[in-house]
Image (cartoon, rainbow, N blue to C red):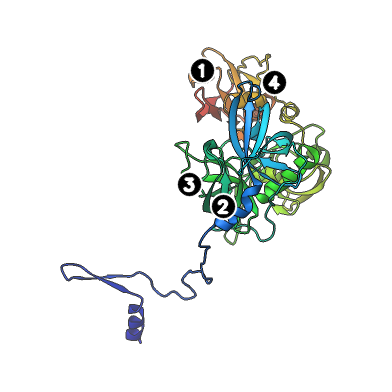
Amino acid sequence: MAMQTALKALKHIRWSVSSAATATVILLSAPIAGAQALGFPGQGNMPDSFADLIENVTPGVVNIIAIENGTAAQGGSEGQGSGFVITRDGRVVTNYHVIRGADDLRVEFGNGESFAASVIGEDEETDLAILKIANDRPFKYVEFHSGNPIRVGDWVLAIGNPFGIGQSSSVGIISALGRDAEGSGPYIDYLQTDAVINRGNSGGPLFNMAGKVVAVNSAIYSPTGASVGIGYSIPHFMAEGIVNDLMAYGRVKRGFFGASMRTAEMTWEGEGSFHGGATIESLVQGGPAQMAGIQVEDVIMNINGQSIMNSGEATRTIAGLRAGSVVPFEVQRTNQEDLVTVNVTLTERPGKDRIDLLLGSAPNGVDQSPTAASSDSGMGLVDLSSNFRDSIGMRRDQVGVYIDTVAPGSHAERKGLKSGMVILEMENKPLASVAIFESQLAKALSANKSSVLLKIRTLNGSENYVGLTIGS
């Protein structure tokens, strides 16, 4: 019996003989109960040519000419991007960053036709915009994909205007889903593709093999400035809702919850699974969350039936809901075993500066009335606005407090903290305002802590951690 088992096993062994005629056994595979070799049951066919697909969809793809500091005739500076016609009456989808700050816009088709255009809606948060071609004739247009979910490995076709050289096409696959792109903000999980995308492709369509738009090409990861096979596109299931809002209202009526959040620590649920959540960091006074009974340190586990793993998921889920919606939030509350369901009526999300003000941050730039350097921290601090954070290169999803002064001889000075640095976190908790910093510091002092861990943005933009001694 043992010999029969051994002989069967030999069928799964390949042999390699060296030049010295010494036989070496290399076990490439061995039979395991219940295991199967992976493969694809289909034929694996792909088209011999993409020419018919390209010919069919190209009439709906356009180049965007954006001119700043005057018109073309006045010698304004010109930038170029891509877009695609989404309606018969000539509405065009593109990226917000393609048309940002433009004084004059033109839309050019692949056949050479050129038309003036105007902005009818834009959303900086998701980097999308809608233009309207200034002509009453009907236009050929393309449509967003609907039907089966897109998957990693699906073939895709990118058409755009790379480097302003004119329309060109490239083919690849969907390489990954749920990607973050640095500096992109909290509202988009990108699709990644290896179809060649370069500067100028921004705003252009990514098609599937049925000629439907599965994503809007938006950014690339590149250490060189040119394509290295990592392109980021806004998936159709995110883009289409934004586009519909922009066409209907000129803006996105995004749901507003009224709280800042941080990612909760992962907890073991048993049976091989972990769960995270989003911890409530602070509440807007009179905001939807506070009015519904949400509390600081509640951990959001589920929103509207969708499980939440981190603060980013919570933010994107809320942003995908509309103002006026009554949404069930399941939260884990301190000292309570069972989840608590809180129904929150979302309002319309205000602008970034208004949110800064509601959360205790300065409305414009750096507040000119910083706090005095306290004996507990040795620093005088200032709230920051989103505009100032952008101006110094902080990510859109980051908050912090600005170090205005450092007391000579203080622990802060001895740790190398300087005016102009930004405190991003204390004890791994984001600091949206000086008020939150002072509250967290007071908690640490009342708990008899002698030091706190700070995450610092240094003067050159790098980030590191500092253990700061507190108290006099």
- Amino acid marked by disc 3: Gly
Residue appearing at x 59%, y 31% in the figure: 79
- Alpha carbon separation for disc pair 1 and 3: 45 Å
Label 2: element kind: strand
Residue 141 appears in the figure: yes
Instruction: State the residue lying farthest toward the top.
Output: 408
Could you say whether the residue bearing mark 1 is in a helix, strand or loop?
helix
In the rendered structure, which amino acid carries the disc numbered 2? Leu
One can see residue 397 in this view: no
Q: Identify residue for label 3.
A: 229
Q: Are marks 1 and 3 in contact (CB under 8 Å)?
A: no
Q: Which mark is residue 157?
A: 2
Question: How far apart are labels 1 and 4 at the CA level?
Answer: 28 Å
Image quarter in which the N terminus is found: bottom left
Viewer-closest of 371 and 49: 49
Separation of marks 4 and 2 at Cα, in angstroms: 43 Å
Q: Residue lying farthest bottom?
A: 1
Give the labeled residue for mark 4. Answer: 364
Q: Are marks 3 and 2 in contact (CB under 8 Å)?
A: no
Measured from the top left, where is residue 317 in percent x and y? 71, 46
Q: Which residue is mark 1?
A: 413
